[in-house]
Image: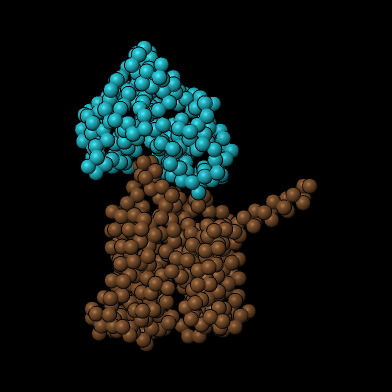
Chain colours: A cyan, B brown
Amino acid sequence: MTFLEIDQLSAFYGQAQSLHDVSFNVDQGDIVAVIGTNGAGKSTLMDSIMGMVKNTGAIRLEGQDLVGRNSADIVKMGVGYAPERAHLFPFMSVEDNLMVGGYTARDDIGRNLAHVHELFPVLKDRATQETATQSGGERQMVSLGRALMTSPRLLLVDEPTIGLSPKVCSEIAATLKRLNEEDGLTILITEQNINFAMSLAKKVFVLETGHIRVSGTPEELMADKELNKAYFGT
Amino acid sequence: MGGTINWRHLLLWAVFLGGMALLPQLVSKGTLRTFIFANYLAIFAMSWDVLSGRTGYISFGHPFLIGIGAYTTAILSYRFDVPVGVSIPLAVITTMAAGTLFFLPALRVKGTYFALVTLAFMELMYQLVQVIRPDLTGGTRGISGVQTLTRGAVNGYYLSLVLMGTIAVSLWAMMKTRMGTALSAIGMNEEAVEGLGLNTTKLKLFAFMVGAGVAGIGGAFYVHYLGSIAPRALFDINFLFTIIVAALIGGASTIIGPMAGAFFLTFLLEYLRPILPGAERYFIYGGIALVLYMYQPKGIYEVIRQAHFKLAGSARHEHNP
């Protein structure tokens, strides 16, 4: 069943167009990845879904149009967002960062916080630490935890592995998989790290300069010689 | 930052304010008058901090808000014989309305541009009070003979202390709520706050209204302490920077910080007066501010906090060698 439907989406920063008629669907309970290089439009795509960029076309969540709504409404409808490079509140403690995430999901705060601590026990141990003093991996955990505090049904994760070691990437991948399999969370990831995206996603879309060029299952894309040449140089 | 209100902190507030209440028994009347100015500067610095220190929207026009509060009550009480019990609340309400006006640019501009727009508010106000209805505002000479609320340094001190204490504890409690945490988050990364589904416009408006309300209270009581008001003394760049430096030197985005900065600056400027009677004094505090920012950008509050941690750490170390 289609959960998120993106239809002919174009996005603009002033006069500059960053996305051109992008269309794809995400089914409920799936992990879908959008891969692309710097400047492909990945973050713009995420910001468009969150109502943070001027756009045209249609974005529907369970049939309800998101275009024209503000971020507050979109989060209330069940979309959680972990932005690129975490975008944390650097001089706040881990706990306060998570609490800002839980601002709109007041009734679920206790349950969500317990779940975040279960997923990332280190965040409980470091609850009072300022996030500015944390490692990149821990910051990414706070970012994911903060998005989970909004009680999402669809989780948007923008380049979660940027600047992280392979070991931490594996941990992040395992957590996203767990969220998908155990909680049934639908996840949309954007990535430059193709191996990471391929290892997680059921379906992958390749975004180039604001256009969807290719799409398919990881197996189909791995078999695509041109794509391998473009992204792996092989 | 956020967190829950704990009784240890409330006790510390009580000890601090209780200690301040004993000052009239311990210091001269002259020193007490300096404390009165420090208390009012602390109120102005705290109000600036709610508006700018928390949300990151740096206002260069804070005297505009203080001036609205001061002029409203001065005009109502002096020109129209409105009782002070009515004119002060009206002044605070008017200042909060002006805070909404102040808020409008924040919907469109940020950073330097916002600072410049707010500076324009202050300059505009300075020009307007001189030319529009000088029969009411007193024009360039301002208004003297405004009713004072207290007689003598001791009573004036207690009034300023009650005001400062009430405002400080109220703002401290407010900042301990989820809303206070969200306001601080806006100052650090507004887009991320928006992406988490918080209505940043409403939150900023709230901060601006509270900041303006406190500025209005401070301005109104200040004019009824001084008994006079003049545009050049109020809408003045030195006054503006004293407020901002007090908040920053003490530690922005805290409550104790702007208070500590206000006390430090007021006494520094006062003790420098015999040595440097002119505006050169401001170079000294500018220099101190510069050194402090280079050493510890989070201000006096953080210097004390770090020292406390070090002392506590070494004490533990001595107990557990």
Residue B240 in the figure: left or right of residue A134:
left
Instruction: Tell me where residue B110 appears, x and y as whole percent.
Output: 34, 54
Above-or-below relation of B294 to A2: below
Above-or-below relation of A35 to B36: above
**Can I make out residue B149 in this image?**
no
- Please state which of residues B27 and B270 is positioned toward the viewer in this rendering: B270
* Residue at position x 30%, y 19% in the image: A215
Above-or-below relation of B137 to A172: below
* Residue at position x 49%, y 67% in the image: B246
- The single residue placed furthest to the bottom in the displayed view is B145
Instruction: Tell me where residue B126 appears, x and y as whole percent.
Output: 31, 75
Instruction: Tell me where residue A83 appears, x and y as whole percent.
Output: 40, 37
Q: Residue B225's image quarter?
A: bottom left
Q: Residue A63's image quarter?
A: top left
Quarter of the image containing the N terminus of chain A? top left
* Residue at position x 31%, y 62% in the image: B117
Residue B236 in the figure: left or right of residue B283:
left
- Please state which of residues A192 and A53 is positioned toward the viewer in this rendering: A192
Q: Residue B19's image quarter?
A: bottom right
Instruction: Tell me where residue B294 appears, x and y as whole percent.
Output: 54, 58
* Residue at position x 44%, y 38% in the image: A86
- The single residue placed furthest to the right in the displayed view is B321
**Can I make out residue B193 in this image?**
yes
Quarter of the image containing the C terminus of chain A? top left
- Count the marks: 0
- Please state which of residues A111 and B140 is positioned toward the viewer in this rendering: B140
